[in-house]
């Protein structure tokens, strides 16, 4: 049976590290969250992110805008947040209502406050060999951190990433490549998908299809990271649904050497990386202030 890569435990350890760093800072790191519309999953994600901030001593400022908000109203709010000294990081929860232009909105977050790492200036740098973005996107960074802290070697391995979205699949593939994996990216038009995935010594599933990756698609001993979060009907559950990943956990556990569960795998790691990026943003602000003070003393 596969070893369980326990995202809850690793994320708890990271949060403890962040909490002690935050306590040492002379300022309180601040995260502004912008939630638009009434998508219940998005509301839950934002609530969990703000709760996690509070637990480590990061201030969070929540903004909830109606589904019919205009793009210029969103852009005005982002401009205000960009100017505020107590806001070190800005997060706009995705997906956005369809009348809003996602790329225009994400580009309105200044790259130095882009703690989700979705600004093209941050995402683009991931593709440049030897360069680091100001912030790496949280879910891909969470996958990498989970692998590294679990002692999984990335360099030299064949990693297969299922999914090529700009916020999960593609940046995850680029980050694995930067750590010297040999990377294959699969998507909905990939031919002979099962055979391609079977080549993966590390398999990252990020497609949004419940239990899509089955045991026959996994080579014995592979490490499997399940990014998917899918709600499936479960009338016996209090909420009427349960969360499952993109991987058939029971079947794949029998062939993989290690696997992340859903929930309790990549999800908590994503939030931990958001906290880490917000701390980093605050630390950079402090470092800049110190430089300015030194300059003014000259
Ligand atoms: P998108 O819908 O943006 O992208 C899905 C990707 O999967 C696309 O590249 C698509 O290919 C590919 N795909 C879809 N169907 C198939 C198929 N049958 N075979 C192969 N590839 C396929 O999703 P996201 O990247 O935003 O999210 C993916 C999953 O990760 C979702 O379940 C989401 O909920 C979850 N997620 C989890 C997070 C966490 O913290 N754990 C954070 C963010 C997302 P194509 O490009 O050809 O259309």
Image (spheres, rainbow, N blue to C red):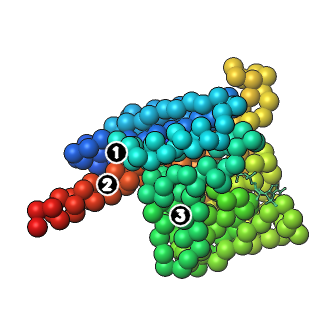
With 265 as the anchor, is 279 left or right in this view?
left
Q: Is residue 265 above or below residue 195?
A: above
Task: Estimate the spatial distance between the alpha carbons at disc 2 and disc 3, rounded to whole Å.
Answer: 18 Å
Q: Secondary structure at mark 3?
A: helix
**Mark 1, residues whose alpha carbon is within 10 Å: few (<14), some, or many (≥20)?**
few
Task: Estimate the spatial distance between the alpha carbons at disc 1 and disc 2, rounded to whole Å.
Answer: 9 Å
Residue depicted at x 51% and y 60%: 136
Residue depicted at x 66% and y 70%: 159
Mark number displayed over residue 85:
1
Residue 175: give x, y in percent of width and height: 57, 68
Residue 34: give x, y in percent of width and height: 55, 38
Are the residues flagged by discs 3 and 1 in contact, CB closer than 8 Å?
no
Q: Is residue 61 above or below residue 222?
A: above
Q: Which residue is mark 3?
A: 122
Considering only order in the chain, which callout, 1 or 3, is on the residue closer to the N terminus? 1
**Mark 3, residues whose alpha carbon is within 10 Å: few (<14), some, or many (≥20)?**
many
Task: Estimate the spatial distance between the alpha carbons at disc 3 and disc 1, rounded to whole Å.
Answer: 21 Å
Of 169 and 124, the residue lying toward us: 124
Residue 293 in view: yes
With 205 as the anchor, is 65 left or right in this view?
left
Q: Which residue is mark 2?
A: 285
Residue depicted at x 54% and y 41%: 76
Residue 244 in view: no
Are the residues flagged by discs 1 and 2 in contact, CB closer than 8 Å?
yes
Q: Secondary structure at mark 2?
A: helix
Q: Quadrant of residue 124?
A: bottom right
Considering only order in the chain, which callout, 3 or 2, is on the residue closer to the N terminus? 3
């Amino acid at each position: 049976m596969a070893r369980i890569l326990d995202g809850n435990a690793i994320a708890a350890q990271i949060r403890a590290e962040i909490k002690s760093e935050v306590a040492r800072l002379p300022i309180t790191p601040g995260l502004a969250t912008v939630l638009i519309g009434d998508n219940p999953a998005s509301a839950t994600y934002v609530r969990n992110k703000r709760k996690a901030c509070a637990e480590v001593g990061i201030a969070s400022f929540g903004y909830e805008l109606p589904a019919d908000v205009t793009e210029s109203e969103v852009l005005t709010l982002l401009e205000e947040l960009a100017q505020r000294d107590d806001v070190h990081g800005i997060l706009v929860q995705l997906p956005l209502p369809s009348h809003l232009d996602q790329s225009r909105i994400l580009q309105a977050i200044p790259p130095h406050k882009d703690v989700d790492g979705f600004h093209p200036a941050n995402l683009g740098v991931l593709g440049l060999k030897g360069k680091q973005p100001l912030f790496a996107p949280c879910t891909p960074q969470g996958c990498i951190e989970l692998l590294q802290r679990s002692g999984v070697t990335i360099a030299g391995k064949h990693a297969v990433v299922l999914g090529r979205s700009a916020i999960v699949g593609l940046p995850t593939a680029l980050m694995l490549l930067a750590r010297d994996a040999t990377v294959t990216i699969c998507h909905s038009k990939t031919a002979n998908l099962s055979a391609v995935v079977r080549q993966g010594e590390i398999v990252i599933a990020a497609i949004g299809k419940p239990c899509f990756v089955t045991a026959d698609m996994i080579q014995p001993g592979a490490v499997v990271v399940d990014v998917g979060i899918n709600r499936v009907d479960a009338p016996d559950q209090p909420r009427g649904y349960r969360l499952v990943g993109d991987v058939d956990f029971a079947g794949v556990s029998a062939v993989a050497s290690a696997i992340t569960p859903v929930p309790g795998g990549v999800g908590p790691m994503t939030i931990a990386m958001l906290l880490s990026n917000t701390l980093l943003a605050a630390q950079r602000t402090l470092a800049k202030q110190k430089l300015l003070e030194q300059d003014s003393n000259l």
